[in-house]
Image: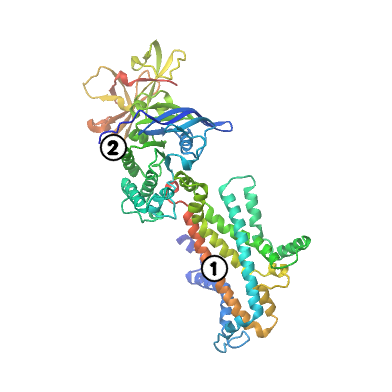
Amino acid sequence: MPERPVADRPMIEITNVTRSYGAFKALDDANLVIREGEFFSLLGPSGCGKTTLLRMIAGFDNPTTGTIAVDGQAMEGIPANRRPTNMVFQSYAIFPHLNVEQNVAYGLKRLRLDSAEEKRRVEEALGQVSLNGLGKRGATELSGGQRQRVALARALVMRPKVLLLDEPLSALDKKLREQMQVELRRLQQAVGITFVLVTHDQYEALAMSDRIAVMFGGRIAQVASPKEIYQRPVNRQVADFLGGMNFVKAEIVEEQGASLVVDTLGFGRIKTDKPKAFVRNGSGATLGIRPERLRVLWDDSSAKFEVSGKVVERHYFGEITHLIVEIPGLEKPLSVTETNDFGADDIPVGSSIRLAYDPEALVALAD
Amino acid sequence: MSGLRRFLPGRSWLGAYAAIYVGFLYLPVVFLPIFSINTAATPKFPLSGYTLKWYEELPHTPALLDAAWNSLVVGISASVLATTLGILAARAITRYRFPGRRTINGLIMAPLVLPEIIVAISMLLVMLQLGLSLSLFTVVLGHVLICIPYSMTVLISGFEGFDRSLEEASADLGESAFGTFRRVTLPMVMPAIISSLLVSFTISLDEFIIAFFLTGTEATLPIYIWGQLRFAAKLPGVLALGTLLLVLSFVMLSIAEVLRRRAARRTSNEGGLYA
């Protein structure tokens, strides 16, 4: 299935939004534009303000200052029941006294459609989430995955402009969660509705989103595509939150416009892009390189850029092996993940190895 | 289990103990219906014969019918009032966090363990101080007081764990606050409300001490029964009436318990985060 193009038209505009509880700011001056038809994720640890932001878009909470607009319309003073958004709750919030069909038709009842049309839309929504034929099933007789689908159908049947998802997969086991990630993405591509997903699971965000906003402590740290977020994190916090990262100390040699030339003990002189949020603080800097961007060099093979060191730990993970390698000059040993195709799982602890790297993979990180 | 069994004096002893225990609890209750269908007027073994005449006489006793009517009026009034007040209090206690929440909860539950005769005397004093003349109305007030703890116990178990996101989901799907109350909140807590009404009604129906102190000239069923006990010849009739009350109470409390459990099951939003 080809990717559905994202329109360059704003669907949600969040402008200078702050939410304070007394002296505590759950959300601090957030600015964000989510485009029409986009699968957008708000990613961050618990307490970062992502759920607060989602609930303000839904209308369950209001900004202390700032404005939220959906499809060009300011949402101030509009209660949740009159917003063009629908939500999939973390607990799913399936009405336990209604069956699947009645749950899905709940919001339609207010539209006073004729019964054939209502039935058709309910069937369509159940089809979209692969729950055909389960309409008469009681809400309490459903499995976790089915409850999740009912919650989705119940929201989708309203044909919202924006579908809000509050950690919808966190209650599912790993296998079902991974399956639902694929399905959710497929569904979003099929219906073309703007999805806003809140999650603390970086893999979930990376796998499903067109773009991701990474949030810490009530602030948005970076907004970018999954690939850019992963490969070019703006600062240490973002880099650390999304998967493993080796941090390498460096000395700034010179700044050349948008580039930075640094010296490291292990990797020598590196020229790298200067991160947007970079603030020079003396001559020190931090570089980062992902564990999988370091490749083990076998026997007499060589690479243009390589470092050598000693394996101090080895951890086996089935398809990959995780090595901890001490490099002379580096204060912390490097994490290396290597696929097991060539026998990385047999490298003895204590042996010397050489690692190849691409200088491009070393990125400068703001603190 | 096997560790525990070593300290027990054998299974047969345990079984015998359980049988005696249950017998002690329910044997007196069983005598009531047995003697109520005995032809002799005195409750004595051996039974002299089987009859339903004591039951047949009941509807032909005007004083009894008056008392039954009074009990019905008091029971319905007290249960509706106690449940209404109980709903408000239970909702507040289960939904909101406010200072003194536990204390208030404790105070509402206190009549459950206060000596009933003391409560009755205190209420009598208060009513007289207020200048209220004793009537069925004062009995209703007294019964509301003792019904509320029972009503609250039932309602809190029904309201507790009511997932707030259910109401949010309803609003999110376009429903107004009133519509949400009608379509989500009420149907979910209804079994608990009916259960509370049944429990309160049963408590009021069987209650003697407070009714005895607070009623004027109008008797409720327990007061009528107490009055009849002075006449030995009336005893079989009282036993028949008592049997009916017993059955009615048992049936209503059973229904109430079934409903309470259903409400508690409904409100705890199974699956999801807390699965």
Rate crowding at label 2 as few (under 14), some (14 to 19) or many (20 or more) other CA atoms within 10 Å: few
Q: Residue furthest left?
A: A300
Task: Specify the quadrant that holds the N terminus of chain A.
Answer: top left
Mark 2–mark 1 CB contact (< 8 Å): no
Circle 1 — which element? helix
> Residue B162, can we see it?
no
Q: Which image quarter: residue B58?
A: bottom right
Can you give x and y, in whole percent of width and height, for residue A278 in the image? 43, 18
Q: Position of residue B57 (x, y in %)?
A: 60, 84
CA gap between label 2 and label 1 equals 62 Å
Q: Quadrant of residue A209?
A: top left
Amino acid found under the numbered disc labelled 2: Gly
Which residue lies under the disc numbered 2?
A318
Q: Quadrant of the image for the C terminus of chain A? A: top left
Q: How many marks?
A: 2
Q: Which residue is mark 1?
A: B252
- Judged from the image, the secondary structure of the residue bearing numbered disc 2 is loop
Res B116 visible: yes
Question: In the figure, is residue A120 to the left or right of B53?
Answer: left
The image's mark for residue A108 is none
Q: Is residue A64 left or right of residue A7?
A: right
